């Protein structure tokens, strides 16, 4: 009896899970392999590429592949999820039907078996997928109830490259089993992403290679033992030109309501494709009898009892309406893609729309009340939002970059700082560059990255990954001509290294050795990866580079730009991918190890989606590297922090049973968020902002000469005005009480905060202070302030002076490498600084202090003279003037009012220019 190798591997993995509880590793893995393979015959085993001569070959191969998988995933836990829902007009149905065995699960059972036996998923992971897709099914609508009109809209929020495709593939399988007749998958803007998604759907839903229309070539789920091919009407194929075509669809026939076969479409978000699809369905209406048509409220004939499910992958891209409209004229036409999707939905009496994204800001900012007379309601996920937590083995933003405020989350030591590219004055692609900035070389950092790719590939071979996909990413610009030039020089450098390794060039081998010793030994040791001997790595370099594609793969819209992982599945594709926009979203780079990324943007969703290195790196996390600038690394860490704050707020609102609409407002109120293109937020004309109960501080300062001089002067003038009032000295610090709000506002107005630090932006703080004038109680809270000039203990020889007062500055270290004029020091106040204006000693926490007198009714402004040094060595930066930071301890008083500010104006103030 023939047995597939992957199925055996999956069973061994499950056996290991049992044995590991009582037997230590590696004996537990050896025991699992022995028990499962003991009664097998090597001649019955089907392996996609390896030739197994003996059972010893099988045992060695299983151990080589599984030793890294079980060690990196043995502590992995499936991601939890939280839900916000609005049950208005909705009747739960799915779980009742499941418990009563009223759904014949054919597609889902087949997909579940495929995940377990072919993909090698653990049972716990599959059960987690089962659970969350059950929850989504519960929140859409029962498609089997005849003549019942419904319109459900939801959103599933995951992490970049975290398994959203598997989630919506599971949803498709269950929806077909439950009775949805028409499934449309909207798969990004580019043909290569659409083809990639179609391939997954072919393997995991359809079970047939749609590129071969003449024959039924069974793949994926239909190749399982005892599983037959189930016919589905597919109107798109995985070919490069396999998107929906009305002529092709008409040859297949129209809608056949009496058939059990569902209709499946995988299409781009392209206006002509969507319009053709709309036209096709309109033409089908005239061919149907009265059981399958109905009249909507406007008397228009629409499709009935043919329930539609639209899956919108990357739902924040193109789908939201970004056309600026006046608030009193919702009849102005929306943007084309948004209009087409809404028009498509209006053709059906029963429809559900489920969006998937890792960056949900644009979707949440859609006005939930916006409704067009003919297009109906906008695409706001009014029915539900499900937020997926990442599994513990997910190689994601927090794991890679760490968090700003959490010393336990410092990120992995895989970041290599790039200093010779994407700088304001660098010879290779300056930060501000245009399409004609064609480079005549590649920088040394990129050459090193190529070497790292070769070394990581060689070590992966030693770990039994020789037949796995292996990819390097180079993403520096969106301009095709520049990408072409980079490709040319990358090819030259790659071939230079290739020839050197083939010919055992001593100088080149010495360079590889130095990089391996300096970087790979260190990182693998820190991360607990196995460290191979140099002699082993050296022997593996040549076969590793010989397997690699000699020419880099350009992914920029040119012909044949699709990475052909599918046809190299058995032996693995090893290549360098160079691109821009097409690498920014959705496209999966299999086995991505080395990323060279210097393309700048400060929009959260744009940067996060560009992070193709996120995903699952079982067995080779320690071999991954991200070459990027210190500034970009800092932004990714900041974004990781902001996303985690957002997810924590989501969890709290889920606990409070909030609705999706209420969540939208909560997102906007966070003072740190620079989230998405302002045009996608156009429906919210004012934005709520509150500092109540917070500590605001200038954790990021500017080293720009004019700003340092300005702020030094602003503080000097401020202190001179304060010295006319009585002050006390407490623990070397100067303290003024009962300072007028006007003096505070005048100082803040004269102080220039760092442009990329929204929370401490003085314009926003002033708007918040002035906003308290609307109410007598809130006005009184900010009418008088306490102020302190924070100083260390002074000696005559080391004291300085500001505003006529002697002081000794505080020393703060840079938490990230200085880049441009950005000084990130993370935390300015000391742990007890907020207590300075309390008359008695207190053990209250900072949070509790802000709800206690005197803070409850009086803000505290703390001024900090600073010396900035490096973290590793006590080397102080030489700056034009001493930088001054500040911190504000705000009352946690419910009488404080939310402030509002105009979105367009504030985004113009705070949003960095996007350099490309």
Image (tube, rainbow, N blue to C red):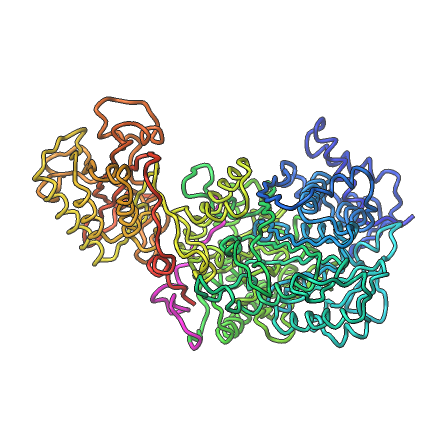
- Viewed as shown, does residue 210 lie left or right of 851? right
Residue 195 seen by the camera: no
In front of the other: 72 or 649: 649
Q: Is residue 637 above or below residue 852?
A: below
Residue at far right of view: 1
- Viewed as shown, does residue 321 lie left or right of 843? right
**Tally of marks:** 0
In front of the other: 295 or 418: 295
Query: Any magenta on residue 423?
Result: yes
Residue 896, horizontal then vertical, whole percent: 32, 39
In front of the other: 915 or 765: 765
User: The C terminus is located in which quarter?
Assistant: bottom left
Residue 198, horizontal then vertical, whole percent: 71, 63
Residue 458, horizontal then vertical, whole percent: 62, 55
In front of the other: 257 or 483: 257
Range of residues picked out in magenta? 411-436
Quadrant of residue 29 within the rendered picture: top right
Query: Any magenta on residue 815?
Result: no
Residue 567 seen by the camera: yes
- Viewed as shown, does residue 204 lie left or right of 894? right
Residue 66, horizontal then vertical, whole percent: 71, 43
By secondary structure, the bulk of the magenta-drawn segment is best described as loop
- Viewed as shown, does residue 437 lie left or right of 808? right
């Amino acid at each position: 009896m023939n047995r597939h190798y992957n199925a055996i591997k999956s069973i061994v993995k499950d056996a290991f899970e049992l044995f590991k509880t009582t037997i230590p590793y590696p004996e537990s893995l050896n025991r699992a392999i022995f028990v499962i393979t003991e009664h097998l015959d090597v001649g019955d085993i089907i392996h996609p590429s390896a030739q197994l001569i003996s059972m010893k070959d099988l045992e060695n191969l299983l151990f080589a592949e599984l030793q890294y998988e079980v060690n990196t995933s043995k502590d992995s836990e499936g991601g939890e999820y939280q839900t916000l829902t609005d049950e208005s007009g909705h009747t739960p149905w799915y779980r009742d039907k499941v418990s009563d065995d009223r759904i014949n699960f054919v597609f889902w059972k087949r997909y579940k078996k495929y995940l377990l036996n072919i993909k090698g998923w653990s049972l716990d992971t599959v059960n987690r997928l089962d659970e969350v897709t059950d929850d989504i099914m519960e929140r859409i609508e029962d498609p089997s109830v005849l003549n019942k009109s419904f319109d459900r809209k939801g959103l599933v929020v995951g992490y970049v490259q975290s398994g959203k495709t598997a989630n919506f593939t599971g949803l498709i399988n269950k929806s077909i089993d439950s009775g949805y007749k028409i499934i449309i998958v909207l798969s990004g803007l580019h043909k290569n992403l659409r083809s990639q998604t179609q391939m997954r759907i072919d393997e995991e839903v359809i079970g047939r290679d749609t590129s071969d229309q003449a024959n039924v070539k069974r793949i994926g789920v239909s190749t399982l033992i005892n599983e037959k091919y189930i016919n589905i009407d597919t109107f798109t194929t995985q070919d490069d030109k396999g998107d929906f075509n009305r002529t092709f669809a008409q040859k297949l026939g129209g809608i056949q309501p009496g058939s059990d076969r569902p209709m499946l479409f995988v299409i781009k978000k392209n206006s002509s494709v969507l319009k053709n699809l709309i036209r096709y369905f309109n033409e089908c209406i005239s061919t149907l009898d009265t059981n399958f048509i109905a009249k909507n409220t406007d008397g228009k004939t629409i499709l009935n009892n043919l329930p539609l499910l639209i899956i919108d992958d990357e739902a924040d891209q193109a789908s939201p309406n970004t056309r600026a409209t006046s608030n009193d004229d919702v009849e102005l036409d929306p943007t084309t893609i948004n209009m087409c999707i809404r028009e498509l939905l209006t053709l059906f009496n029963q429809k559900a729309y489920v969006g998937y994204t890792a960056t949900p800001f644009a979707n949440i900012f859609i006005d939930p009340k916006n409704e067009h007379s003919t297009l109906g309601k906008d695409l706001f996920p009014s029915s539900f939002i499900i937020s997926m937590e990442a599994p513990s083995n997910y190689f994601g933003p927090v794991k890679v970059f760490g968090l700003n405020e959490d010393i336990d989350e410092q990120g992995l030591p895989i970041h290599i700082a790039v200093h010779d590219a994407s700088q304001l004055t660098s010879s290779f692609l300056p930060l501000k560059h245009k399409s004609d900035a064609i480079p005549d070389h590649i920088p040394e950092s990129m050459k090193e990255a190529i070497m790292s790719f070769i070394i990581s590939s060689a070590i992966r071979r030693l770990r039994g990954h020789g037949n796995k996909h292996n990819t390097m990413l180079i993403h520096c610009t969106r301009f095709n001509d520049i990408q072409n030039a980079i490709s040319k020089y990358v090819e030259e450098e790659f071939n230079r290294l290739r020839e050197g390794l083939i010919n055992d060039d001593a100088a080149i081998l010495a360079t590889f050795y130095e990089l391996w010793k300096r970087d790979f030994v260190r990182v693998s040791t820190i991360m607990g990866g196995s460290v191979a001997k140099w002699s082993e790595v050296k022997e593996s370099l040549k076969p590793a580079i010989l397997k690699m594609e000699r020419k880099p793969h350009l992914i920029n819209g040119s012909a044949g730009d699709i990475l052909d992982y599918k046809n190299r599945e058995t032996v693995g594709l090893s290549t360098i991918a160079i691109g821009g926009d097409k690498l920014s979203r959705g496209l999966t780079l299999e086995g991505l190890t080395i990323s060279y990324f210097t393309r700048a943007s400060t929009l959260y969703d744009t940067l996060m989606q560009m992070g193709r290195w996120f995903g699952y790196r079982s067995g080779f996390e320690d071999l991954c590297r991200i070459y990027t600038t210190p500034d970009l690394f800092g932004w990714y860490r900041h974004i990781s922090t902001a996303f985690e704050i957002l997810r924590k707020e989501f969890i709290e609102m889920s606990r409070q049973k909030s609705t999706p609409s209420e969540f939208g407002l909560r997102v906007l109120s966070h003072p740190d968020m620079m989230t998405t293109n302002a045009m996608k937020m156009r429906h919210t004309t004012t934005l709520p902002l509150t500092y109540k109960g917070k500590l605001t501080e200038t954790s990021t300062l500017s080293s720009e000469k004019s700003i340092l001089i300005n702020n030094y002067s602003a503080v000097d003038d401020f202190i001179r005005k304060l010295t006319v009032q009585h002050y006390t000295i407490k623990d070397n610090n100067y303290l003024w009480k009962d300072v007028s709000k006007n003096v505070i506002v005048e100082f803040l107005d004269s102080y220039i905060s760092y442009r990329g630090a929204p929370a401490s932006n003085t314009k926003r703080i002033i708007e918040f202070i002035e906003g308290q004038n609307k109410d007598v109680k809130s006005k009184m809270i900010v009418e008088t302030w306490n102020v302190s000039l924070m100083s260390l203990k002074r000696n005559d020889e080391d004291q300085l002076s500001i505003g006529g007062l002697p002081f000794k500055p505080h020393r703060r270290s840079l938490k990230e490498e200085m880049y441009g004029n950005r000084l990130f020091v993370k935390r300015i106040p000391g742990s007890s600084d907020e207590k300075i204006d309390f008359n008695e000693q207190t053990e209250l926490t900072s949070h509790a202090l802000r709800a206690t007198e005197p803070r409850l009714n009086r803000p505290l402004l703390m001024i900090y003279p600073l010396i900035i040094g490096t973290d590793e060595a006590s080397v102080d930066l030489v700056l034009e003037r001493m930088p001054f930071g500040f911190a504000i301890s705000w009352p946690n008083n419910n009488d404080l009012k939310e402030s509002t500010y105009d979105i367009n104006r504030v985004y113009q103030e705070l949003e960095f220019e996007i350099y490309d």
